[in-house]
Image: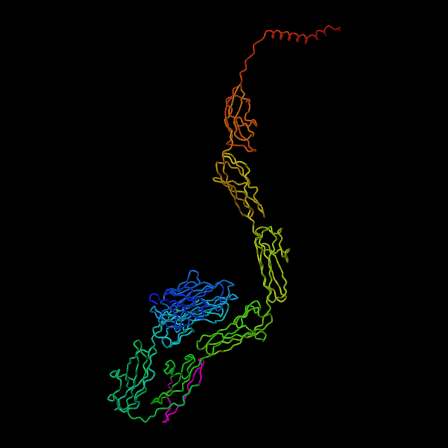
């Protein structure tokens, strides 16, 4: 394969693969989690994926870390999710548009991260298929190693809150090469679950070290000036929480040490040159330089600084000399180490002797303290005035334990070899170091502490969970290898999970669990205390009908469940607007004649199974107000320009109340009332808003397009001798006309003419007003004027004949009046 075509995508040719081989590229390849033909290699590696939950909660997001178990300098990967989606990839990774596959985006990394969001409820088991490749950093296939892995994650049957950790740090805070690194943190779980299955990903100088998966890193894995971080994915045995990352810790240089310094002769004559020998060590394997001082009677003789021997010419009988040395590794000095006293001249003293040096434990484990014992003797009978002890770990003196007779368990770890050494001083001479036999610190079995069975209620309403803390004195990660559940003393076959489903036990059962814990080498067993399954009180839920109004009967659905299948009774209490309605006690339905809009009805229910009552369950519903319906009806049949057009809102309805206000609006105006008239001008839009007594509103609009209507035209007046003849033209259907003179209606006619005799002379103004279906037109009316004069009456001439006859009539009348008087006068007296 050419250099620029290097496919860092790790797709491996596995005989069990279910996907067809695909090619990979140095910038990544999606959907290639089973292998490819371009990187077939006999070299293999293990794909690592941390952060996956034991069970997923639908919709939850989990942070995943991907890596390889080898020391390759470059690499790639491809991972496919059967369900759920990937997001938030690290800078050197990328996700496809569907979120179903993630791959590397550059070929220079060997560790990556991405978030996986679990699928929705009911999906079932999801599978993450992963392929990884380790490359040689040269963009060719030489030395490639490939590997695949598949992870099946079942769906959680019950909701569980994922745990979290706080305060994550690496201790000690200022480590040196001889220190073991420890991931220290506080584990938190909202459900009270114990920590189980937490995973650790250690990174060296930013690159994942896949082989380090415990909570500690042994000092043998570290070197000075290295930078370490740890990613911890907390787990409660059911779900994993968000990955937490520590701050970076840098390994400091370990100063060198001198573990043994011996003079060539402790009792020389004044003619003997004295040399020395030493044993030194440096945890960082740095080359060492030494600073040497010779002391006479406790005082440094500077002229002999860095001299490798004490010349005899500088000594005399009776002198007491010592040599002291310290080492330097280029960064730090060791403490000064001083030899035993060198007594110049003859001496008859014999040094004391330590024998039979033994250790108290021959097969210790990590939790054991080890005590050194020995026998003492001095051939001169001198008293032992001083004793010095030291401990040797894996062949090197362990200076923190100097002068300890008992080596505490906190200083030991499994796999180490230890021995003790002692020397004695009789006031003149020190004995040689006398060692004990070596012992080997064995692995300690893991422990399940705080072991218990947990249930929120101890009833069949909840699952039973095993809670415990898995600890290991060696710092090993622990794993549950076996779980046995016992029900009333009988083994529950097939049940080997930390959670026992509530459907598997009944009221009155006694349940016990036995747990087998392993650290990968040895196992331990622990048994919980038994838990008795108690009576489960009934549970009540209330479901209100949808779209209910005051026109409907109100009948909520009361559901009572009893996990123990006990018979139950129910007590119902009703409240209206917060006040108890005693007439409704025990009723299941509130009839519609009792409800009104905006009322709040509350139902309180308590159920009993004869042993316990349920908790009081309340459900409330507010009766909704039905919004009124605004309806505009046109009263006028025709829409004519310049004429009044009548509309009414009296057809509007309110099904559960009454309309209290009608508001009409149009361009330029507003009016309140059930009906309304508007003078039209080509086009108008009228809006009606109705409001009920609860303040609910509804509005509707009516568009009116007006046209020209019929009109009175060609009105004419003919005046003659005080009489007026009116006539006009009408271009519409036959109708009636109101005739007005000088502001007073004088007639209604159904013809197009009218004859008038005004009582007074002068100016007369006539107004002809059409009436169409009781609608008086405005624009269709017409007016005209005329001047009316009174007729001329001539005075009559006197008639002679008539005068004569009038005179004769007056004469006869006078005779007729006076004749009776004369006749009475002639009668006898």
Instruction: Identify which residue, 620 or 505, lies in the foreground.
Output: 505
Task: Give the tally of numbered discs.
Answer: 0
Quick check: 803 above or below 620?
A: above
Q: How is the image coloured?
A: rainbow
Q: Can you tell which quarter of the image residue 15 is in?
A: bottom left
Instruction: Identify which residue, 824 or 677, lies in the foreground.
Output: 677
Image coordinates for residue 226, horizontal then vertical, percent: 35, 72
Q: Residue 383 lies in magenta, yes or no?
A: yes
Q: Is residue 748 visible?
A: no
Please, which residue is most extreme toward the right here?
A: 828
Image coordinates for residue 544, horizontal then vertical, percent: 58, 56
Image quarter of the N terminus:
bottom left
Image coordinates for residue 600, horizontal then vertical, percent: 57, 54
Image quarter of the C terminus:
top right
Instruction: Identify which residue, 411 or 648, lies in the foreground.
Output: 648
Image coordinates for residue 458, horizontal then vertical, percent: 57, 69
Quick check: 309 above or below 528?
A: below
Quick check: 597 above or below 296?
A: above
Q: Can you tell which quarter of the image residue 39 is in?
A: bottom left
Instruction: Identify which residue, 60 or 329, lies in the foreground.
Output: 60
- Side of 80 relative to 821 (left or right): left
Magenta segment: 361-389
Quick check: 639 above or below 337?
A: above
Q: Is residue 99 visible?
A: yes
Q: Residue 211 lies in magenta, yes or no?
A: no
């Amino acid at each position: 394969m050419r250099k620029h075509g290097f496919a860092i995508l790790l797709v491996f040719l596995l005989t069990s693969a279910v996907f067809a081989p695909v090619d990979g590229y140095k910038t990544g390849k999606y959907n290639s989690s089973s292998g490819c033909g371009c990187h077939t290699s006999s070299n293999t590696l293990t794909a690592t994926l941390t952060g996956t939950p034991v069970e997923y909660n639908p919709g939850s997001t989990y942070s995943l870390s991907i890596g390889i178990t080898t020391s390759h300098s470059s690499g790639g990967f491809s991972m496919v999710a059967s369900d759920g989606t990937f997001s938030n990839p690290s800078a050197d990774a990328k996700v496809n548009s569907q979120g179903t596959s993630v791959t590397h985006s550059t070929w220079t990394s060997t560790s990556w991260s991405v978030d996986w969001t679990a699928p929705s409820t009911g999906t079932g088991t999801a599978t993450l298929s992963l392929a990884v490749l380790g490359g040689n950093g040269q963009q060719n296939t030489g030395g490639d190693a490939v590997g695949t892995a598949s992870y099946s994650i079942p769906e959680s049957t019950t909701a569980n809150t994922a745990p979290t950790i706080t305060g994550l740090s690496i201790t000690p805070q200022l480590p040196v090469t001889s220190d073991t690194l420890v991931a220290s943190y506080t584990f938190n779980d909202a459900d009270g679950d114990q920590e189980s299955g937490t995973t650790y990903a250690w990174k060296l100088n930013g690159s994942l070290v896949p082989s380090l998966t415990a909570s500690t890193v042994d000092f043998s894995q570290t070197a000075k000036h290295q930078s370490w971080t740890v990613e911890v994915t907390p787990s409660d045995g059911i779900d994993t929480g968000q990955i937490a990352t520590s701050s970076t810790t840098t390994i400091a240089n370990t100063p060198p040490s001198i573990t043994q310094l011996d003079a060539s002769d402790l009792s020389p004559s004044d003619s003997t040159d004295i040399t020395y020998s030493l044993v030194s060590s440096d945890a960082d394997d740095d080359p060492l330089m030494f600073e040497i001082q010779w002391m006479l009677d406790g005082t440094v003789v500077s002229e002999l600084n860095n001299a490798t021997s004490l010349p005899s010419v500088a000594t005399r009988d009776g002198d007491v000399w010592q040599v002291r040395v310290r080492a330097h590794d280029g960064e730090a000095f060791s403490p000064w180490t001083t030899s035993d006293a060198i007594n110049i001249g003859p001496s008859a003293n014999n040094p004391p002797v330590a024998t039979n040096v033994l250790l108290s434990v021959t097969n210790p484990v990590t939790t054991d303290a080890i005590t050194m014992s020995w026998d003492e003797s001095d051939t001169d009978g001198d008293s032992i005035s001083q004793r010095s002890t030291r401990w040797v770990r894996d062949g090197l003196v362990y200076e923190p334990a100097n002068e300890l007779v008992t080596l505490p368990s906190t200083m030991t770890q499994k796999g180490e070899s230890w021995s003790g050494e002692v020397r004695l001083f009789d006031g003149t001479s020190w004995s040689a170091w006398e060692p004990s036999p070596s012992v080997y610190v064995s692995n300690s079995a893991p422990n399940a502490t705080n072991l218990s069975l947990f249930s929120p209620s101890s009833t069949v309403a909840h699952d039973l969970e095993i809670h415990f803390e898995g600890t290991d004195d060696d710092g090993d990660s622990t794993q549950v290898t076996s779980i046995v559940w016992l029900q009333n003393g009988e083994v529950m076959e097939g049940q080997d999970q930390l959670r026992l489903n509530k459907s598997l036990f009944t009221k009155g059962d006694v349940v016990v669990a036995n747990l087998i814990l392993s650290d990968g080498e040895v196992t331990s067993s622990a048994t919980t205390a038994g838990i008795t399954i108690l009576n489960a009180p009934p549970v009540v839920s209330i479901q209100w009908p949808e779209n209910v109004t005051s026109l409907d009967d109100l009948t909520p659905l009361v559901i009572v469940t009893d996990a123990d299948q006990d018979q139950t009774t129910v007590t119902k209490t009703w409240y209206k607007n917060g006040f108890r309605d005693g007439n409704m006690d025990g009723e299941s339905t509130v009839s519609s004649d009792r409800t009104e809009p905006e009322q709040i009805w509350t139902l309180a229910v308590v159920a009993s199974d004869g042993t316990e009552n349920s908790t009081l369950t309340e459900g409330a519903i507010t009766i909704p107000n039905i919004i009124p319906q605004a309806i505009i009806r046109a009263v006028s049949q025709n829409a004519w320009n310049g004429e009044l057009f009548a509309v009414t809102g009296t057809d509007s309805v309110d099904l559960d109340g009454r309309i209290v206000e009608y508001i009409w609006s149009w361009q330029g105006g507003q009016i309140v009332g059930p009906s309304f008239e508007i003078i039209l001008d080509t086009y108008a839009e009228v809006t009606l808003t109705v409001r009920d007594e609860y303040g609910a509103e509804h509005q509707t609009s009516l568009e009116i397009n007006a046209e020209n209507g019929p009109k009175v035209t060609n009105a004419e007046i003919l005046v003659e001798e005080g009489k007026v003849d009116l006539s006009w033209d009408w271009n519409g259907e036959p109708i009636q006309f109101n005739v007005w003179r000088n502001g007073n209606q004088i007639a209604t006619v159904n013809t197009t003419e009218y004859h008038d005799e005004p009582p007074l002379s002068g100016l007369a103004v006539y107004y002809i007003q059409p009436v169409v279906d009781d609608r008086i037109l405005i624009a269709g009316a017409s007016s005209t004027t005329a001047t009316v004069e009174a007729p001329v009456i001539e005075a009559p001439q006197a008639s002679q004949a008539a005068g004569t006859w009038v005179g004769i009539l007056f004469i006869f009348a006078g005779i007729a009046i006076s004749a009776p008087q004369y006749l009475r006068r002639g009668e006898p007296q």
